[in-house]
Each structure stands twice: as structure tokens, then as C-alpha cells.
Image (cartoon, rainbow, N blue to C red):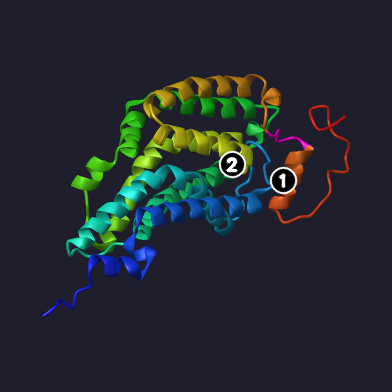
Amino acid sequence: MSSLAPTRDQVDRRSPLRSLNPVWTTALLLGAALVAWIVTIDRMRGMDAGPGTDLGGLGWYVGVWVTMMAAMMLPSVAPMMLLFARISRERQARGRAFVPTWVFLAGYLGAWTVYGLAAYGLFRLVTAFGTDWLAWDRAGPYVAGGAIAAAGIYQLSPLKEVCLRHCRGPMHYVMHGWREGRPGALRMGAEHGLFCIGCCWGLMVILFALGVMSLVWMLVVAAVIFAEKVLPHGLRVARVFSVAFVAVGVWVAGSPGSVPGLTQPDSNKAQLARNKMMGMDTKPMDKKPSKMDPMGP
């Protein structure tokens, strides 16, 4: 009598989402990253107010942050996702419980959401005590430049290396840290997300320092993350970026107006971005631009 249990081929024909074929998994990841970038560009275009950009209301910020993380991180986390999908599929073929890859991804993005909430809380805490001293004609450029330089120095730290090695070669973690069921996959995703945060939190500090709503700097940081995690010699690449970030930090502190792609917070462009953040559809400021305003004649 033939077995009533479905064969592996029959399971594969049910749905590409369930079979987790590597081709489909790759296509879904790249498609999700593309959609996330499209949504991010659509929502954030014209909102770059430079360093110190207000983060808006909590609900709006969380939505934008999660979309940003999906756009920036999915390409670099794709190898780990494919590895998880492959092992999950092999375990299913041996009669183990099926675990969808999206559960792992949910845990991963959940870890980054916690990081984003911590950054939001810190921002609100600082602004609650007044930010006059952070004005762009006072200590603002030095604080932004110092944060960028500090993130560059972190690139050389042992913790950065440990976390980057994990992100570049997660096979040991998957083979020895596998947890059963959906709760286990969720936890694995969160743990991998923590390693990713340990690797990339400094890069996110750089993004906040240069303007968290800047699409230009977001693309730059996303490219750096991908290069470190996916391209050959990622550890060496991280050290090269360390020198570059320290140089950029000094540049921002010493001559912020000459940094390409850096929106000056006291410019008309920045004011328009702040107006858009507040839901205002206004024209440029009616007042005459100040001598400090690079947008002026």
C-alpha cells in the first residue's frame, strides 16, 4: 500500500513560498528590497533637513524606520536568509516541522526596530533639554563630525570584527544554534539581528549625524554595509572605511558647507524639509536669506 504522506516533489509543487526554493527565495528577497526602496524614496523625498532632522511622531517614525531597514538590510542579509531557507527545507524533507523564512526575517527586523526605538528615545531625551548648543553655527558641526569619527574608530574594534565575522559566515551559528519551531526561528532572527546591530550601529550613527532622512547618505551607508558583509575581503574593506569615516568626520567638523550631499540645517532646503515633515505644503521662506545660508544669492 502506498504511503499517504506527500513526496518532496509534491510538497515543492504546493507553493514556492512553502518549498522555499532558493531561486524563489532570492527573487522574493530582492523584490521585497526593491519595494522597500520605492516606498522609502516616495515617503522621504524632500525630507532631508540635514543633521538634527526631527524624527516626527513615533508611529510615523516606526513605519519609516522599518521600511528603511528592509531597504538597506535585505540585500546584505540575503545570504543568511538563503542559508536558513535551505536548512529549513532539508529538515522538512527529513520529517521535521516546516518553519517559514519570513518568521526568521520578522525576528531580524524586530531587533532593528528596537534599535530604532532606542535611537528615537535618545533623540527625544536630548531635545527635551534644549538643543540651542547644537545649532549649526555653534557646536553642531563638531558634534556631528565627532560622532562620524567615533563610528570610524569603532570599525577597528574587536566587537566590530566579531560581529562582522558572524554576519559574513553564519554557518557555524545556524548549525550549532538552530532552534525548533516558529518561536525558535523568531529568536534566531532576533539574535542574528543583534549581531548585525553590533556590526552596523556605528554606520547608523553616521546616517543620523549626516541626516537620517537623506536618501543620498542612506544609499551610501547601505552600500558600505553590503560591501562589508557580502563582498570579498569584507574585514579589510571595513578598515578602509574606518579611515574614510574619520576623514569625513574631520571634514564635517572643519568645513561642513563644502561636504557634497550634506544639507545645511540653516538653509532654505532644510526649512522646506521641516515644513514637509510637519505636513505643510509651503514655498521657500519669505525672509531674505542670511549670510550663513548657502542657498542665498
Residue 292 appears in the figure:
yes
Question: Which three-letter amino acid code belongs to the residue tagged 1?
Answer: Ala
Q: Position of residue 68 (x, y in %)?
A: 53, 49
Which is more toward the observer, 141 or 207?
Answer: 207
Task: Indicate the position of residue 201 as horizontal and vertical percent values.
Answer: 44, 37
| The magenta segment | 263-267
Residue at (49% x, 19% y) in the render: 243
Residue 29 highlighted magenta (yes or no): no
Label 1: element kind: helix
The image quadrant where one finds the N terminus is bottom left
Q: Which residue is mark 1?
A: 273
Can residue 205 be seen? Answer: no
The image position of residue 162, as x and y in percent, is: 30, 32
Disc 2 marks which residue? 212
Q: Is 178 placed above or below 154 here?
A: below
Badge 2: residue crowd in 10 Å (few <14, some 14–19, many ≥20): many
